[in-house]
Image (cartoon, rainbow, N blue to C red):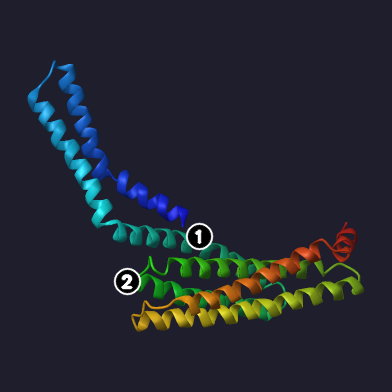
C-alpha cells in the first residue's frame, strides 16, 4: 500500500508534464534576472510556472484515481514477470522430489492466481479491491514459500537414518496437507472475487476478506510448524547426521 501511494505521489508531482513547465518557468526567471529584468521572460516564467502548477492540481483533483489504477497495473505487471521467472525455477526443482503433488499444487496455484490477475486487470474498481488483492498476493507468496520448503524437507530426508527420515517425512506430509487446505481456501476466495467481477458487484467484501483471513491463518500455522520443527531436537539430529 505504501509503495502504491509513493508511486502515485511521484506520478502526480514529478511527472515530466509537471516538472518541465516548472523548470522552464524557473529558467525564464533566472535568465530575466541575469539580463537585468525582461518583461517577456518574466511573463514566460509566470505562464510556465502557473501552467505546471495548474496541471499538477488538475492531476491531483481529477486524475488521482486513474493514475492510481495505472500505477497498480504497472506494479502488478512487474511483479508477475518477476514471479513467473521464480515459479519456473521452482517447477524445475519440484520435478526432483518424486512427489507429483508438489508439481500439481504449483500448477493449480498458478492457474488460480492467473484467474485472479485476469479478473483484477478487468476490474473497474481496482482501488476498492486493493485490500483483497494484497491478501491474495500474500497468501499466494506464503503458499509458494511452503512448497519450496517441502523440497528442502525432501532433500534433508535423503541421507539420514531411517528413524529420523520417518519423522521428517511425516512433518513434510503435515505441511503438504496444510498447503492443500490453503489452496482450497484460495480457490474459493478467487471464485468469489471473479463472480463479483462478472456481476459487476462492489458490495460487501466482508465475506471475501473472511475467506482470505481463514487461508492466511492456515498458512501462518504451517509456517509456525516449520519454525518449530527447525528448532526441535529432531532438526538438530538431522543437522548432525548430515555433517
Quadrant housing residue 51: top left
9 relative to 88 in the view: left or right: left
Q: How many marks?
A: 2
Residue nearest the observer in this picture, 77 or 92: 77
Of the numbered discs 2 and 1, the one sitting upstream in the chain is 1
Closer-to-camera residue (231/240): 231
163 to 86, vertically: above or below: below
Residue 200, position as x, y percentages in the image: 33, 80
Q: Residue at x 18, y 19 (%)?
A: 33
Toward which corner of the image does residue 163 lie, by quadrant? bottom right
Closer to viewer: mark 2 or mark 1 = 2
Tell me the SS state at disc 1.
helix
**CB under 8 Å between callouts 2 and 1?**
no
Q: Is residue 49 left or right of residue 231?
A: left
Instruction: Give residue 108's position: percent from left, percent from top.
Output: 56, 79
Q: Tell me what residue is drawn at x 75 percent, y 78 percent.
A: 173
Please state which of residues 164 and 70 is positioned toward the viewer in this rendering: 70
* Dot 2: element: loop
Q: Quadrant of the C terminus?
A: bottom right
Q: CA distance from mark 2 to mark 1?
A: 25 Å
Say which mark, if any, is on residue 124: 2
The structure residue drawn at horizontal position 72% and vertical position 74%, both measured from the top left corner, is 175
The spot of residue 154 in percent (x, y) is: 76, 70
Q: Residue at x 21, y 38 (%)?
A: 21
State left or right for residue 178 relative to residue 131.
right
Please state the horizontal and vertical placement of residue 70, each as a whole percent of the image. Answer: 34, 60
Residue denoted by label 1:
82
Circle 2 Cα neighbour tier, 10 Å, few/some/many (<14 / 14–19 / ≥20): few
Residues packed near mark 1 inside 10 Å, few (<14), some (14 to 19) or many (20 plus): few
Q: Which mark is residue 196?
A: none
Amino acid at each position: 500500500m505504501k509503495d502504491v501511494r509513493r508511486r502515485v505521489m511521484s506520478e502526480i508531482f514529478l511527472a515530466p508534464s509537471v516538472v518541465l513547465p516548472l523548470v522552464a518557468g524557473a529558467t525564464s526567471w533566472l535568465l530575466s534576472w541575469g539580463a537585468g529584468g525582461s518583461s517577456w521572460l518574466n511573463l514566460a516564467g509566470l505562464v510556465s510556472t502557473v501552467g505546471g502548477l495548474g496541471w499538477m492540481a488538475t492531476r491531483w483533483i481529477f486524475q488521482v484515481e486513474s493514475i492510481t489504477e495505472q500505477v497498480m497495473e504497472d506494479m502488478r505487471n512487474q511483479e508477475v514477470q518477476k514471479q513467473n521467472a521464480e515459479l519456473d525455477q521452482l517447477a524445475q526443482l519440484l520435478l526432483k522430489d518424486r512427489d507429483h503433488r508438489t508439481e500439481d499444487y504449483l500448477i493449480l496455484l498458478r492457474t488460480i492466481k492467473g484467474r485472479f490477475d485476469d479478473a483484477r486487470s478487468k476490474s473497474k474498481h481496482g482501488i476498492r479491491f486493493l485490500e483483497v488483492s494484497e491478501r491474495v498476493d500474500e497468501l499466494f507468496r506464503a503458499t509458494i514459500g511452503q512448497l519450496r520448503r517441502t523440497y528442502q524437507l525432501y532433500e534433508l530426508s535423503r541421507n539420514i537414518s531411517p528413524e529420523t527420515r520417518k519423522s521428517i517425512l511425516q512433518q513434510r506430509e503435515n505441511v503438504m496437507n496444510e498447503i492443500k487446505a490453503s489452496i482450497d481456501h484460495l480457490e474459493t476466495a478467487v471464485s468469489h472475487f471473479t463472480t463479483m467481477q462478472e456481476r459487476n458487484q462492489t458490495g460487501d467484501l466482508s465475506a471475501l476478506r473472511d475467506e482470505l483471513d481463514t487461508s492466511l491463518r492456515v498458512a501462518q500455522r504451517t509456517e509456525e510448524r516449520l519454525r518449530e520443527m527447525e528448532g526441535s531436537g529432531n532438526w538438530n539430529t538431522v543437522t548432525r547426521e548430515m555433517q
